[in-house]
Image (spheres, rainbow, N blue to C red):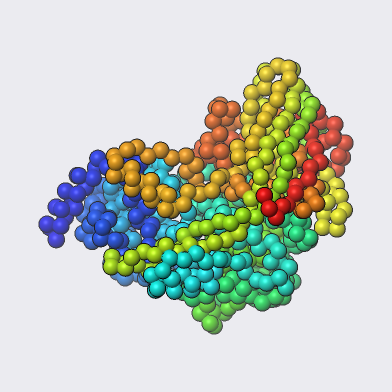
C-alpha cells in the first residue's frame, strides 16, 4: 500500500508539467470513454489513480481541507452510494445528493492532477450516471478545466438519445465485430399527427442544448449568484415553446395547448428508448387522466402551488420565508418568478411556493406507474436530455409559459417615447433567401457498447435525418444622427395562426423567435449593418464529435503541441435550427429588427467581443447577462395599439417567406 502511494506521488510529480489544455482534454475524454466499463489499462495515469489513489491521503490538495471528499468517502465506505448498473435521474433526491457530493469534491481540488485522480477514483466506484453528471458539471464550472470541450453527451451516453431498435442493432454489430451504420427513425407512426414535429423534439442538438442549459444553470446551484438565472429559465423555455409552435404551424398543426391538471393528457407517448441499465422508458397511452404520484406529489399539491403563484402575480408581490413582501412589479420580478416556479435554490420561499416545474416533470414522468406497482424506471420527462421527446413536455412548458405571461402582461405597454431611439432610423431591411431542408447526420454509438482491454472497439454509428437551413444574411440600413453604439435585436414571427388568420400585434409578439442580438457601432450618417446567420448570438455550431476531440487531444499530447479551442459551451440553440421549417410554397413570417440605444449593454466590449456568441439563451458564463433590458424586449409587453410600434422609426418589419426544399 505504502509503495503504491509513493508510486502515485511519483506519477503526480511527473504529471505536474502536463496540465496544458491538451493533457486536460485528453484526461476528460478518457474519463468519459466507455463509461460503463472500467478505465482502460492503457490510460496508465487514470488507471493508477483509480486503483491506488486514496482520496483520504490527499486532502492537502483540497481547498476545504478535505471535508467534501471525506464526506463522500464516508458514504462510499459505508456502502450508502447508489450502485453501478442502475439508472440515474437528477430528480431523484438521493441520487442528486450523491452526484453533488462528487461535484463538491471536484470543485474543491486545488490542482488538475488531484481533480483528475479523484475523478478516476470515483469513476470506478460510483453509479455511472451520477459520475457523468458530476463530471459534466465540474468541467462546466471549474476554473481548472477552462477551455476543455465536453464531448457531445449523445456520444457519451447514446442510449438517452437514440431508440432501442438502433441500440439492438448496435449490440449485434458489436457481437459480430462488424462495423455498422443504422438508421434511426423518429418515434411513432404517420397515424400520429404529432409525429410530424418529432424531428424537432427528438433532435439531438435540441436535446444537447437543453441538457447543457440545465447544467449551466442548475436548479440546485447555491454557490455564487448566477445573473438573471430565473429570467433566463423563463426565456429559454419560452423560446423553445415558441419555436415548437412555429414548427407545428409549418406542419399544419395547431399551436400547443397548455396542460391542465383536471383534463386528460391528450397525447400519449411511446419513447422506444431504453436505459443502458434499468429497462425500457415507460410509455403513456393517449388521454391519460392525471393521477397522484406516490412519494412525489398529489395533483392537488400542484394546483395549490399554481394558485399561490398566480395569487402573487395578481398581488404584484411575493412573500419570502420570513413573511416579508417582495415586489415583482418591476423588471426584476420575472427573475424572482423564474426562481420560484422552477424552483431553484434562489427561491425566496420554497416552503410556500414549492417547486411547480420540477415536481410537474416528475409527476408527468411517472404517469405510467404512479404508484410504483411495476417498478418502472423514470420517464423521459425526468431527464433534461430526453424530456423534449415527449409532446407533453411542450404542453407543460406552455402551461409554465402562460403563468409567466400573466405576470408580464400586467405591465403597462411601452410608450412611444420609451421605444424610440432618436439617434437612429432604419431606412431599409434586406434579407437573403430563407429556406430549410433535411440532411443526414451521423453520430457514434461506440461508447454505448461494452468493451474491455481484450475486446476491440467496433465503429457503430447511427444515421438520422435532421433539419438545417441555407445560410442567410440580412442587411439593416440605418441613418444615424451621431456616432454611437447601438443594440440590434432580431426576431422572426409567424404571420398567421393555425387557421390562417393573421395574428394581431398583441397575439403575435409571444410567437416571435429571437434570431439574434448584437451590439454595433453606428457612424453619423448612413450605415449598412450586414449580419450572417452563422453569427447569431442565440445559436452554436455543431458540437465537435467525440472522435474529433479525441484525435485532436491525442495528437497534441503526442507531438507536444498546443491545443486551441473555440465554441467551448454546449449551451446554445443549434445553429442549423435557427429558422423554423418553411413550406414548399413559402411560409409567411415577419422579420422584425429593432435598433435601440447601446446603453443597455452591461459589458464595455460587446461590439468587438461576443463572449462566445451564444448569450441570447445562455448568458455569459460567470458574467452579467449582456443586455440590461428585459429578455424579449421590446416584444415582452402588451401592444394594444399597433400604431405605436408601426410608427417607431428605429423598428422595421418585413414580410418574408421561409421555403422548405426537399433538395438543397
Ligand atoms: Cu428545461 Cu422543464 O425545464 O425542462
Q: Residue furthest bottom?
A: 373
**In the image, residue 440 lies at what x, y percent?**
58, 56
Vertical placement of residue 595 versus 392, above or below: above
> In the shown orientation, is residue 162 left or right of residue 236?
left
The foreground one among 85 and 529 is 529
The total number of labels drawn is 0
> In the shown orientation, is residue 580 left or right of residue 508?
left
Q: Based on the displayed image, in which of its 4 quarters is residue 19 positioned?
A: top left
Q: Residue furthest left?
A: 3
**In the image, residue 85 lies at what x, y percent?**
39, 71
Q: Quadrant of the N terminus?
A: bottom left
Residue at image x 58%, y 78%?
A: 369
Residue 553 appears anywhere in the view: yes
> In the shown orientation, is residue 21 left or right of residue 137?
left
Residue at image x 69%, y 66%?
A: 195
Residue at image x 27%, y 56%?
A: 43
Vertical placement of residue 475 versus 99, above or below: above
**In the image, residue 588 lies at what x, y percent?**
80, 47
The foreground one among 585 and 557 is 585
Residue at image x 43%, y 53%?
A: 546
> In the shown orientation, is residue 464 left or right of residue 307?
left
Residue 323 appears anywhere in the view: no
**In the image, residue 72 lies at what x, y percent?**
33, 60
Q: Based on the displayed image, in which of its 4 quarters is residue 70 positioned?
A: bottom left
Amino acid at each position: 500500500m505504502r509503495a503504491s502511494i509513493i508510486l502515485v506521488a511519483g506519477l503526480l510529480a511527473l504529471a505536474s508539467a502536463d496540465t496544458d489544455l491538451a493533457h486536460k482534454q485528453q484526461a476528460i475524454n478518457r474519463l468519459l470513454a466507455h463509461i460503463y466499463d472500467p478505465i482502460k489499462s492503457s490510460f496508465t495515469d487514470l488507471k493508477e489513480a483509480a486503483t491506488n489513489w486514496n482520496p483520504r491521503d490527499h486532502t492537502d490538495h483540497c481547498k476545504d481541507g478535505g471535508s467534501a471528499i471525506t464526506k463522500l468517502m464516508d458514504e462510499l465506505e459505508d456502502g450508502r452510494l447508489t450502485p453501478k448498473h442502475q439508472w440515474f435521474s437528477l430528480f431523484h433526491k438521493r441520487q442528486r445528493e450523491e452526484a453533488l457530493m462528487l461535484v463538491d469534491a471536484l470543485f474543491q481540488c486545488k490542482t488538475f492532477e488531484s481533480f483528475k485522480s479523484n475523478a478516476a477514483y470515483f469513476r470506478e466506484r460510483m453509479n455511472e450516471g451520477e459520475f457523468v453528471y458530476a463530471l459534466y458539471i465540474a468541467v462546466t464550472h471549474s476554473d481548472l478545466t477552462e477551455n476543455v470541450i465536453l464531448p457531445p453527451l449523445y456520444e457519451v451516453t447514446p442510449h438517452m438519445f437514440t431508440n432501442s431498435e438502433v441500440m439492438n442493432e448496435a449490440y449485434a454489430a458489436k457481437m459480430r465485430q462488424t462495423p455498422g451504420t443504422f438508421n434511426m427513425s423518429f418515434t411513432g407512426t404517420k397515424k400520429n399527427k404529432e409525429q410530424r414535429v418529432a424531428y424537432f423534439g427528438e433532435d439531438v442538438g435540441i436535446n444537447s442544448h437543453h441538457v447543457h442549459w440545465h447544467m449551466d444553470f442548475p436548479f440546485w446551484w447555491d454557490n455564487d449568484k448566477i445573473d438573471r438565472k430565473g429570467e433566463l429559465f423563463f426565456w429559454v423555455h419560452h423560446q423553445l415553446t415558441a419555436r415548437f409552435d412555429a414548427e407545428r404551424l409549418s406542419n399544419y398543426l395547431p399551436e400547443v395547448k397548455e396542460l391542465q391538471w383536471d383534463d386528460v393528457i391528450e397525447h400519449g407517448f411511446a419513447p422506444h428508448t431504453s436505459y443502458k441499465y434499468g429497462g425500457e422508458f415507460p410509455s403513456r397511452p393517449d388521454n391519460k387522466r392525471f393521477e397522484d404520484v406516490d412519494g412525489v406529489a398529489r395533483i392537488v399539491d400542484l394546483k395549490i402551488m399554481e394558485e399561490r403563484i398566480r395569487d402573487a402575480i395578481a398581488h404584484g408581490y411575493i412573500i419570502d420565508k420570513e413573511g416579508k413582501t417582495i415586489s415583482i412589479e418591476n423588471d426584476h420580478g420575472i427573475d424572482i418568478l423564474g426562481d420560484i416556479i422552477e424552483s431553484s435554490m434562489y427561491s425566496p420561499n420554497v416552503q410556500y411556493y414549492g417547486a411547480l416545474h420540477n415536481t410537474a416533470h416528475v409527476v408527468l414522468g411517472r404517469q405510467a406507474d404512479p404508484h410504483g406497482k411495476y417498478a418502472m424506471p423514470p420517464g423521459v420527462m425526468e431527464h433534461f436530455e430526453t424530456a423534449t421527446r415527449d409532446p407533453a413536455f411542450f404542453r407543460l412548458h406552455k402551461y409554465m409559459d402562460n403563468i409567466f405571461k400573466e405576470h408580464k402582461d400586467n405591465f403597462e405597454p411601452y410608450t412611444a417615447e420609451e421605444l424610440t431611439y432618436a439617434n437612429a432610423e432604419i431606412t431599409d431591411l434586406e434579407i437573403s433567401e430563407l429556406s430549410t431542408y433535411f440532411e443526414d447526420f451521423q453520430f457514434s454509438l461506440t461508447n454505448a457498447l461494452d468493451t474491455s482491454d481484450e475486446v476491440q472497439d467496433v465503429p457503430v454509428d447511427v444515421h438520422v435525418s435532421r433539419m438545417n437551413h441555407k445560410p442567410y444574411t440580412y442587411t439593416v440600413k440605418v441613418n444615424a444622427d451621431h456616432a454611437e453604439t447601438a443594440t440590434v435585436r432580431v426576431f422572426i414571427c409567424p404571420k398567421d395562426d393555425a387557421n390562417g388568420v393573421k395574428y394581431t400585434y398583441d397575439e403575435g409578439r409571444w410567437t416571435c423567435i429571437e434570431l439574434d442580438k448584437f451590439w454595433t457601432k453606428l457612424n453619423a450618417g448612413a450605415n449598412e449593418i450586414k449580419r450572417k446567420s452563422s453569427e447569431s448570438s442565440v445559436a452554436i455550431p455543431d458540437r465537435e464529435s467525440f472522435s474529433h476531440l479525441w484525435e485532436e487531444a491525442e495528437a497534441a499530447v503526442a507531438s507536444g503541441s498546443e491545443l486551441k479551442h473555440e465554441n467551448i459551451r454546449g449551451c446554445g440553440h443549434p445553429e442549423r435550427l435557427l429558422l423554423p421549417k418553411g413550406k414548399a410554397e413559402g411560409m409567411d413570417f415577419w422579420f422584425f429588427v429593432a435598433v435601440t440605444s447601446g446603453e443597455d449593454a452591461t459589458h464595455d466590449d460587446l461590439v468587438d467581443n461576443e463572449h462566445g456568441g451564444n448569450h441570447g439563451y445562455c448568458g455569459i458564463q460567470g458574467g452579467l447577462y449582456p443586455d440590461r433590458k428585459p429578455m424579449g424586449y421590446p416584444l415582452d409587453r402588451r401592444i394594444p395599439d399597433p400604431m405605436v410600434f408601426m410608427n417607431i422609426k428605429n423598428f422595421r418589419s418585413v414580410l418574408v417567406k421561409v421555403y422548405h426544399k426537399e433538395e438543397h
